[in-house]
Structures are given as structure tokens and as C-alpha cells.
């Protein structure tokens, strides 16, 4: 009997050793991308479990680990380090992430078919065009007006006229963005579910390409539909990249894996869905590429199990960022993790139970020569970003600005997504409100009750250094380069207040917003940045699209021109040092329930000698009722063609002289 027991033990040890060796080898050889081949594998990935995890042998196999791990987790929680588990156990339904409006910038002057000089969309990366709600080629203006695309002939500034209008094909499709490439106009729309439908499935992204060789008769030449909500897009040398993201759709208890191209359903099945190793997500992100130079070629579509909170696109790569709150793990580990290096022997180290918080995952995708999008690598860092300006690719390295309660910092990765350098943590307890990378420098703005502007030297990516700091009232939510040694900051002006008890002790410190603010900074002496000019706009009720969307800015150093849309509301805002009300302030631009006063386009002359000089205001509308912002004309964008300024809203296009802002003409483009 004793020999039998010994034999069984030896056999079990051999089996476990073989299994352990096999799993470790598999883990070492496993590719970064895991292809999904069946519905069971997809559901397992969404539910965060192994396909074979329901089997009795697997339950028995995980039992020792589960007991040890649960003991360690409960012991840690009893010591006060427990955190809330935010994982979900059910396959979700409903609308996915909200649209990303972006944030980018670079003054660009170009002339294609037209011989005129005209402004283009304010972009972040040279040669990487971004979609916007208004475009121009110098002879025509392309704009959105509710559910229509309006093409306006502006060759004669004294007699502008509508050349044609593009209507949406159904009432559930709303145009959101435009891309202009040579004689092609791309309309990116979002198709909502039918009002009669009881389904909770998310919206779809519709991309439609029009041949506008004849502006009076646009011709649809291509369209495709992705079954997730629109996130963002770029156009690089005639290649259109569109990203959509949301929860998986279901039809008749089946997960949707298809898309539409030119009205035909294309279903690559589960093989087109890929899971990134060690990443669990119930969100589908779709990356698509359409070659506008070869419009007859099929659109290339790839699907990944990942969420997206931020995106940055260079000429060679796409970086998608996902934020995850990580802390105490609830539930048993996967079978595949038990015998690896983080297996049984490392039960207490399976997760760092104490180092919880928000982490940012950065997924890198290569843009290949044929336009294909290929997943490359990922990185992970603690903290979170603000917008696309928190990210920058420079000389093969990726620079990322991150913040959390312990401060803000810049982390630098090489081409292999390995961290090679980072700054010290700056401004502990303050939130980062804006960041900007310009060559070998970076600029950060943090805020609590006063605004520190940090200047950071990145010339040595392995040892980035903080060079200088400037503290002034208020904060900037957007930074824009004026030239190599000067920077424009746009944000809010604040007034610091100390609140005391009846005995005179300091109870709290608050900062009350007193108006919008634009500032001009001189960073020639990087160790001692100075503010050389500022202008305050309106009062605490004033806000602007520029606070959340860089595309609202019109800037030209050569023309000494800076212009932004400005809105007034009758609600006051305060920021307390114990809470973050930033979103309440900047989101007021799209909060239709606030009492709306008026909207105008503020035009400034800007130079280093005189700073900001208000030339005048072009008004498009004034409210007629208490809550009528959404129903009135929304001022969308401003642009210039030669020496004339064009302001474009859903109702009107107005032409004014850049010299003295005298009105030249106007055109009503929406019927009452």
C-alpha cells in the first residue's frame, strides 16, 4: 500500500511538473496578440476567464491557489488596504464611450487648387490632418448645419452662395465630422438606433466619400459602416483612418462581427477580433483604413478587445490609451497563470495589493507602407492623461504626461515601448490641466488655487529635467506655440480666497473664477519663464469651445491674428481645493440647461510688442428664450481666405475684412 501511495505521489509530481513546464513555455512563446476563433473564446475573453475554466478538474486545480490567495487578500483588506472592486461579471449592453472631441494644434497655410491663401484646421502633428466641422479649400467652404452638409461658393467674397447641400440618407444618421482631400469630401456620421427599437445596442459609425469635382453635384462614390460609435479619425497622405469604440452589439443572441461596405454586409467572423495578451476588456475598438487614392480597394478593418480614453496619431504610428483602475483582485486567477512565474510560488505577489490606482495602458500600432494597421507593443504607467496633447512622438521616442494625486510627471519610452526616462513628480495634490510638447521641451500646467507653468528639458530623454516654473493666478487648459520661445495659454482667471472660522483659523482655500484668460509667455530663459501679456475676457459666466477643443482656435503669427468663439452664461463657478469642478466649467459649453446669453467671435491682434489687442467681435446670435442655446445658431468655426475672415455657424456664414472687421457680406444657410 505504501508503495502505491508513493507511486501516485511521484506520478502527480511528474504531471504537475510537465504541466508547469508546458504552461511556462507556452507563456514565453505566446504572441502579444491572441486571435479569437470562436464565440466561446470571445465570451471567455469578455468575461475574463479561461475557456476550460468551468470544468471540474480546473476547479480542483485552482483550489489550492484560491485558498492561499483569498487568505492573503482578506488579510490585507483587514489591515485597511482593501479597495473597491470595479470589475463587471456580466456581458454589458448599451451605448459605449462618448465621442472624443480631441485637442490639437499647428498653424497651417496651404493652397491646393485655389491660388488663394487660406487657413486650415488647427492640428497637432504636421501632415496628419484631423476631421472638423468646417473645412475650406480657398474657393469653397464645407460646413455642417444640423443634419446637412453645406457646400458654399466663396470665390467672390461679396456674393457668396450655396453651391449644393448633402442630405443624410435617414433621420437617424447625424453628420459629425468632415475630412477634405483633394476633390474628395469625407463625411463621418453616427447612426443612432431607431427610436422604435427596444435594443440597447450602441450607435454605428458611417463613413461616406463624395466626389466633389463638380461642387454643385457631389457624387457618392464610397461608404462603409462600423458597428460601434465614432471615436476619432485622421487622414495621412490620402489614407483615411477611422476609429470607433463601444460595447459589443448583439443580434438574436449572437455577437455582431460584421460591418457594411457599399451597402453589402462583410462578415470576417471572429478571426478578425484580437485580444491583447494580459488585457481584459468587454469593449470592442475598431480601426479602419480607406485609401482615398485607390477608392475601389476594400476598406481594411481590424477589431481589438480594448477600450479607448485617449488617442494620438503620428505619421508612422497610432497610439491608443486606455485607463484602468487596478487594486485588489476579486475571484480566482486564470488556469494559465497558475504554473507560470506568477503562479503558486508567487501567490502573495500575484498582484500588488497595496499599489492601487488608475493606470494608463498605451497600445502602439504601426502604420505600414501599404496603409495597413499592425499592432506592435504596449506599455503601462500609473496615472492618467488629459487629452491628445499629453502624448507626443519625437525622434523615435514617445513622451507622455501623466498625473495622479501624487503629482504630475513626464515618462519617456523608446521605440520598443520600454521606459527610458521620467521626470520627478511635480505639484503633489494638484491636477494637471494642460500639457504641450514642442521639440526638446515640454510645458505642463497644474492647478489647485494658483497656476504653476513648468518648463521641462527633454533633450536627454534618459534624464529629463525641470528647468523653470512660473506661478500666476488662474490656469490654462490649452497651450499653443507662438514661436520657438513664446507660448500662448488659454484658460480661466481665478481669484484666491482664504476661508476662516470665527476664531480666525484657516478652514479652506478656494479659487473663484473671474473670467476667461489668455496669456503670452516668454520662455526664452527656460529657467525663468515670464508672462509678458494677458487679457481677461468677460466674467465668471464666460466660456468657450477652445477650452475643450483646439480646433476652435484660429491663429496666424504672420497675420498677427488670434480668434476664438466666446459664450456667456448666467451661472457662476467655484473651484475648491477639496474637489475638482474642472469638468463643470469646461463642459458648460455643451450644457444646454444653463441660461445662455450670447455668442460672438472675438478677434485679436497679437504680437510680442503689444500682446493681445481686441480688434472687435462678430456676433452670430443672441438668445431669445431662457434655455435656447441648443435651438439657436451655434457658432462653429472661423477661418480666413486671403485678407478676409469667414465665421461659420449653423445659420450663417459672414464675411468680414481682416483689416478692420467691416462686414462684406453674409449668407443665411439654414431656414427658420
Image: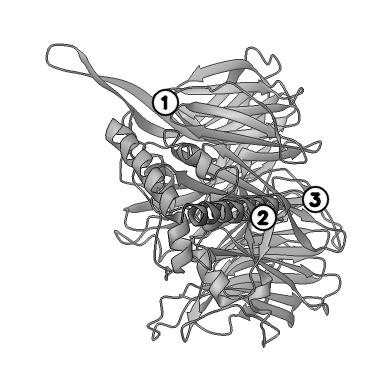
Near-viewer residue (254 or 221): 254
Image quadrant in which you'd find residue 622: bottom left
Which comes sooner in the sequence, label 1 or label 3? 3
Residue at mark 1: 429
Near-viewer residue (276 or 25): 25
Q: Residues within 10 Å of mark 2 (few under 14, many from 20)?
A: some
Image x and y of residue 528, in percent: 63, 12
Q: Image height check: is 113 above or below 309?
A: below
Q: Image height check: is 192 above or below 48?
A: below
Q: Quadrant of the C terminus?
A: bottom left
* Front position among marks 1 and 2: 2
Q: Secondary structure at mark 2?
A: helix
Residue drawn at point x = 75 percent, y = 36 percent: 414
Q: Secondary structure at mark 3?
A: loop
Q: Is residue 589 left or right of residue 207?
A: left
Near-viewer residue (34 or 626): 34
User: Disc 2 and disc 3: Cα gap in Å?
Assistant: 38 Å
Near-viewer residue (237 or 87): 87
Residue drawn at point x = 63 percent, y = 36 percent: 400
Q: Contact, CB < 8 Å: mark 1 with mark 2?
A: no
Residue drawn at point x = 40 percent, y = 44 percent: 69
Residue 158 in sight in this render = no
Q: Secondary structure at mark 1?
A: loop
Q: Is residue 532 left or right of residue 30?
A: left
Residue at mark 2: 22
Q: Which mark is residue 316?
A: 3
Image x and y of residue 206, in percent: 62, 75
Amino acid at each position: 500500500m505504501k508503495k502505491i501511495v508513493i507511486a501516485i505521489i511521484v506520478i502527480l509530481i511528474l504531471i504537475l511538473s510537465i504541466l508547469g513546464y508546458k504552461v511556462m513555455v507556452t507563456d514565453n512563446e505566446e504572441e502579444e496578440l491572441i486571435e479569437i476563433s470562436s464565440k466561446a473564446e470571445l465570451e471567455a475573453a469578455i468575461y475574463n476567464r479561461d475557456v476550460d475554466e468551468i470544468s471540474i478538474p480546473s476547479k480542483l486545480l485552482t483550489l489550492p491557489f484560491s485558498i492561499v490567495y483569498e487568505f492573503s487578500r482578506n488579510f490585507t483588506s483587514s489591515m485597511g488596504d482593501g479597495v473597491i472592486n470595479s470589475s463587471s461579471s456580466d456581458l454589458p449592453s448599451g451605448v459605449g464611450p462618448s465621442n472624443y472631441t480631441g485637442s490639437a494644434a499647428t498653424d497651417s497655410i496651404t493652397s491646393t487648387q485655389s491660388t488663394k491663401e487660406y487657413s486650415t484646421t488647427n492640428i497637432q502633428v504636421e501632415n496628419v490632418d484631423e476631421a472638423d466641422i468646417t473645412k475650406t479649400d480657398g474657393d469653397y467652404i464645407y460646413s455642417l448645419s444640423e443634419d446637412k452638409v453645406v457646400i458654399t461658393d466663396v470665390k467672390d467674397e461679396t456674393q457668396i452662395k450655396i453651391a449644393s447641400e448633402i442630405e443624410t440618407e435617414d433621420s437617424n444618421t447625424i453628420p459629425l465630422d468632415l475630412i477634405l482631400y483633394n476633390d474628395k469630401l469625407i463625411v463621418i456620421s453616427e447612426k443612432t438606433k431607431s427610436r422604435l427599437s427596444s435594443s440597447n445596442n450602441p450607435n454605428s459609425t458611417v463613413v461616406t466619400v463624395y466626389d466633389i469635382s463638380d461642387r454643385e453635384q457631389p457624387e457618392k462614390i464610397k461608404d462603409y459602416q462600423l458597428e460601434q460609435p465614432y471615436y476619432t479619425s485622421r487622414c495621412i497622405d490620402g489614407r483615411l483612418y477611422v476609429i470607433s469604440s463601444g460595447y459589443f452589439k448583439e443580434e438574436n443572441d449572437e455577437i455582431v462581427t460584421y460591418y457594411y461596405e457599399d451597402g453589402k454586409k462583410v462578415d470576417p467572423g471572429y478571426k478578425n477580433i484580437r485580444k491583447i495578451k494580459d488585457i481584459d476588456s468587454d469593449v470592442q475598438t475598431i480601426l479602419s483604413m480607406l485609401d482615398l487614392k485607390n477608392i475601389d480597394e476594400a476598406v481594411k478593418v481590424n477589431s481589438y478587445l480594448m477600450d479607448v480614453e485617449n488617442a494620438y496619431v503620428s505619421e508612422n504610428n497610432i497610439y491608443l490609451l486606455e485607463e484602468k483602475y487596478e487594486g485588489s483582485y476579486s475571484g480566482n486567477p486564470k488556469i494559465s497563470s497558475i504554473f507560470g512565474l506568477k503562479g503558486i510560488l508567487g501567490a502573495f505577489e500575484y498582484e500588488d495589493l497595496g499599489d492601487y490606482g488608475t493606470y494608463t495602458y498605451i497600445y502602439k500600432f504601426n502604420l505600414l507602407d501599404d496603409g495597413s494597421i499592425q499592432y506592435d507593443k504596449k506599455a503601462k504607467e500609473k496615472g492618467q492623461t488629459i487629452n491628445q496633447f499629453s502624448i507626443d512622438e519625437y525622434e523615435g521616442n514617445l513622451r507622455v504626461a501623466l498625473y495622479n494625486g501624487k503629482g504630475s510627471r513626464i515618462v519617456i519610452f523608446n521605440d520598443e515601448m520600454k521606459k527610458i526616462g521620467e521626470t520627478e513628480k511635480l505639484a503633489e495634490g494638484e491636477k494637471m490641466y494642460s500639457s504641450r510638447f514642442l521639440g526638446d521641451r515640454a510645458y505642463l500646467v497644474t492647478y489647485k488655487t494658483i497656476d504653476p507653468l513648468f518648463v521641462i528639458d527633454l533633450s536627454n530623454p534618459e534624464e529629463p529635467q525641470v528647468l523653470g516654473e512660473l506661478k500666476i493666478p488662474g490656469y490654462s487648459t490649452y497651450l499653443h506655440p507662438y514661436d520657438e520661445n513664446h507660448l500662448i495659454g488659454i484658460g480661466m482667471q481665478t481669484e484666491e480666497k482664504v476661508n476662516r472660522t470665527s476664531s480666525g483659523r484657516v478652514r479652506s482655500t478656494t479659487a473663484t473664477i473671474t473670467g476667461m484668460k489668455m496669456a503670452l509667455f516668454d520662455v526664452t530663459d527656460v529657467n525663468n519663464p515670464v508672462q509678458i501679456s494677458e487679457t481677461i475676457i468677460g466674467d465668471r459666466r464666460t466660456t468657450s469651445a477652445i477650452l475643450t477643443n483646439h480646433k476652435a482656435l484660429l491663429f496666424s503669427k504672420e497675420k498677427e491674428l488670434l480668434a476664438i468663439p466666446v459664450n456667456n452664461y448666467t451661472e457662476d463657478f467655484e473651484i475648491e481645493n477639496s474637489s475638482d469642478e474642472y469638468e463643470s466649467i469646461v463642459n458648460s459649453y455643451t450644457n444646454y440647461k444653463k441660461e445662455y446669453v450670447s455668442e460672438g467671435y472675438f478677434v485679436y491682434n497679437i504680437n510680442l510688442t503689444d500682446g493681445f489687442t481686441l480688434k472687435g467681435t462678430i456676433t452670430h446670435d443672441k438668445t431669445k428664450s431662457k434655455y435656447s442655446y441648443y435651438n439657436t445658431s451655434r457658432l462653429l468655426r472661423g477661418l480666413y481666405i486671403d485678407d478676409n475672415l469667414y465665421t461659420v455657424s449653423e445659420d450663417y456664414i459672414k464675411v468680414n475684412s481682416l483689416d478692420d472687421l467691416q462686414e462684406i457680406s453674409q449668407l443665411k444657410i439654414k431656414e427658420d
